[in-house]
C-alpha cells in the first residue's frame, strides 16, 4: 500500500484572486507562463469588490484608470464604476485570459515556509493538502480584514450590528433607527443610500474628512461605441486622466500652493453644499489636507442635512442593550449599528505564517512592515508581494502601481531564467538604503503630518503609502539582478 503523500508542485503560487492576483495571472499568460496556480480563500474571485457589497459601493478612482492597460474597460458605463460593474470586469479578465483552470477557490494558505535545501516554498493548505512552488506571489491586499473596535458592552446590544464590508442584506433597514459608526470612504457611499429608507440615522464622526466633488459622468451609448470601435480614444482619455491625477500629487506636499488649492476646493465644496454654519463647522477638518485619504462625494453632505439624519461628534462610550451611550452621557437607542470603521490595514499577511530562511515575516516586521520596492524582503527568497508596504496612493490609481509590480515580477522570472539562477534574495544593504531614503522622502509630506490615519503605525511611521508619483515609482521599479544575491 502506497502511503506516500502526493505534493502538488507549480512554478508559481499566487495568493489571492482580487485585482492584484488576477492581473498577475493574466500577465503570466501574456508572458507565456502557464505553470501557476491562484489560491483564493473566498468562494469566488473579486477580492475587495466581492467583499464590499454595501449599498452604493463604488470606486473613487476614474474607471479609465482603474483597469489594466492590457485589458481596458472599454464599455464601463460611468467615470466612477460601481461594485457590480467592477466584478464583471474582473470576471471578463479571467475569461479573456483563460484563468479558470488556474483558479482554486475555498482554499486558504495556512502556512508558507522556504525550504533552502530544495530552493522551494512549501505551503500547508486549509483542506489539509500541501503544495510547493519556486516563486511565491502574495497578493493579499491592504484593505481586506474588517476591523470592529473593541467597545465596552457591544455583546449586550440587543439589536443587529455588522461591518460595512460584511453587509447583512438580510437585515431590512426600513423604518429602523440606525447608527453608522464611522464616516470615511465606505460611509460616504452607503449613508446617502440608506438615509431615505431608515426612520432615523445617526452618523458618528471621530474626525471630519476632506471631501472633493465627485462630478460623476455617465457615458452615452455613442461614446461607448466609439471607445470600443476606436480603442485609441479610450487610451487618450486614460493618458489625460493619468497626467491630471499625477499633477495632483503636489497637493500632498505640506505648505505647497497645490495643497492650499486642494484645501480651497474641498472647503468650497463644503460651503456650497452645507449652508448650516454649525453643521459646516463640525464637517471642517482640523488637520493637514491629504494627511488622510481624500474622499469624493456629491451626495454625502446633502444626506447629512436630511431631517432624519444627525451627525454625532461626542463619540461612543459604550453599548447597552437598547443602544449607545455617548461620551457625554446620553443614551441613544438603535435597532441596527453599521461599523464603517475600516480595516486592519497594516497586518499585510494577516494570520498567515510566512517563514523565510530563519525568521517569520511577523518577526521581521515587528517594528512595522517594509520591503524593497514594496515587493521583496531579505530572508524571503523568490517572494514578490503585490501592493505591499509603501505602495498605496492618495492621488492616482492603485491599478497602475499593480501593473508596474506585475511587470517587474515577470522581468524577474525571465531574468533569473536567462541567468540560470534558481533563487534570489534581496541584498540587506540595498533594502536598508531604499527604506531609509523612502522614509526621508516622507518629510514634508502630508502623509506624515499629525493626524491619525491608517497610513501610519502606532509609532507614527508611514508604512502604507508611496511618497512619490506613479511615474517616479515606475522609474525605480526596473529589474536589476545585481541588487539580489543568487542562492
Image (tube, rainbow, N blue to C red):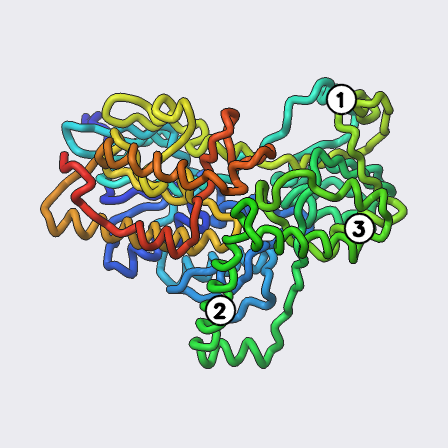
Residue 173 rendering spot, x and y as whole percentages: 79, 43
- Residue 47 appears left or right of 58: left
Near mark 3 (Cα within 10 A), the count class, few <14, some 14-19 or many ≥20, is many
Residue 131 falls in which quadrant of the image?
A: top left
Q: Earlier in the sequence, mark 3 or mark 2?
A: 2
Residue 317: give its label: 1
**Residue linked to disc 3:** 303
**Residue linked to disc 2:** 240
Secondary structure state at the residue bearing disc 1: strand
Above or below, comparing residue 334 to residue 328 in the picture: below
> Measuring 55% from the left and 50% from the top, which residue is drawn there?
256
Q: Is residue 462 visible?
A: yes
Above or below, comparing residue 260 to residue 243 in the picture: above
The mark lying in front, picked from 1 and 2, is 2
Secondary structure state at the residue bearing disc 2: helix
Cα–Cα span, label 3 and label 2: 32 Å
Near mark 1 (Cα within 10 A), the count class, few <14, some 14-19 or many ≥20, is some
Amino acid at each position: 500500500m502506497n502511503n506516500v503523500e502526493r505534493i502538488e508542485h507549480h512554478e508559481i503560487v499566487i495568493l489571492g484572486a482580487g485585482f492584484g492576483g488576477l492581473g498577475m495571472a493574466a500577465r503570466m499568460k501574456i508572458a507565456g507562463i502557464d505553470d501557476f496556480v491562484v489560491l483564493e480563500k473566498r468562494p469566488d474571485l473579486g477580492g475587495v469588490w466581492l467583499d464590499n457589497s454595501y449599498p452604493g459601493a463604488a470606486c473613487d478612482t476614474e474607471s479609465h484608470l482603474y483597469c489594466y492597460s492590457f485589458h481596458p474597460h472599454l464599455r464601463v458605463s460611468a467615470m466612477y464604476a460601481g461594485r457590480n460593474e467592477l466584478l464583471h470586469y474582473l470576471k471578463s479578465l479571467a475569461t479573456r485570459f483563460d484563468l479558470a483552470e488556474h483558479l482554486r477557490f475555498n482554499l486558504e494558505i495556512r502556512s508558507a515556509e522556504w525550504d533552502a535545501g530544495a530552493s522551494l516554498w512549501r505551503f500547508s493548505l486549509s483542506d489539509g493538502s500541501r503544495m510547493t512552488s519556486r516563486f511565491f506571489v502574495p497578493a493579499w491586499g491592504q484593505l481586506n480584514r474588517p476591523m470592529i473596535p473593541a467597545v465596552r458592552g457591544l455583546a449586550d446590544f440587543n439589536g443587529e450590528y455588522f461591518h460595512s464590508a460584511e453587509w447583512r442584506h438580510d437585515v431590512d433597514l426600513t423604518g429602523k433607527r440606525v447608527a453608522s459608526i464611522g464616516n470615511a470612504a465606505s460611509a460616504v457611499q452607503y449613508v446617502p443610500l440608506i438615509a431615505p429608507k431608515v426612520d432615523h440615522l445617526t452618523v458618528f464622526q471621530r474626525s471630519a474628512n476632506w471631501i472633493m466633488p465627485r462630478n460623476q459622468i455617465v457615458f452615452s451609448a455613442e461614446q461607448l461605441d466609439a471607445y470600443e470601435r476606436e480603442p485609441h480614444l479610450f487610451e487618450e482619455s486614460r493618458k489625460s486622466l493619468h497626467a491630471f491625477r499625477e499633477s495632483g500629487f503636489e497637493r500632498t506636499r505640506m505648505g505647497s500652493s497645490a495643497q492650499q488649492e486642494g484645501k480651497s476646493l474641498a472647503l468650497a465644496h463644503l460651503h456650497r453644499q452645507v449652508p448650516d454654519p454649525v453643521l459646516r463647522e463640525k464637517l471642517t477638518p482640523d488637520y493637514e489636507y491629504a494627511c488622510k485619504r481624500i474622499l469624493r462625494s456629491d451626495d454625502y453632505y446633502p444626506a447629512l442635512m436630511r431631517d432624519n439624519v444627525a451627525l454625532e461628534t461626542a463619540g461612543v462610550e459604550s453599548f447597552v442593550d437598547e443602544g449607545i451611550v455617548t461620551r457625554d452621557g446620553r443614551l441613544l437607542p438603535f435597532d441596527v449599528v453599521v461599523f464603517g470603521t475600516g480595516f486592519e490595514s497594516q497586518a499585510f499577511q494577516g494570520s498567515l505564517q510566512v517563514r523565510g530562511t530563519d525568521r517569520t515575516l511577523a518577526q521581521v516586521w515587528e517594528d512595522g512592515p517594509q520591503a524593497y520596492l514594496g515587493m521583496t524582503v531579505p530572508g524571503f527568497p523568490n517572494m514578490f508581494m503585490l501592493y505591499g508596504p509603501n505602495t498605496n496612493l492618495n492621488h492616482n490609481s492603485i491599478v497602475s502601481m499593480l501593473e508596474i509590480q506585475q511587470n517587474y515580477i515577470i522581468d524577474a522570472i525571465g531574468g533569473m531564467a536567462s541567468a540560470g539562477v534558481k533563487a534570489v534574495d534581496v541584498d540587506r544593504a540595498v533594502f536598508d538604503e531604499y527604506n531609509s531614503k523612502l522614509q526621508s522622502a516622507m518629510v514634508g509630506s502630508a502623509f506624515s503630518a499629525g493626524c491619525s490615519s491608517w497610513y501610519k503605525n502606532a509609532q507614527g511611521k508611514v508604512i502604507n503609502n508611496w511618497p512619490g508619483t506613479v511615474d517616479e515609482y515606475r522609474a525605480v521599479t526596473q529589474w536589476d539582478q545585481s541588487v539580489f544575491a543568487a542562492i
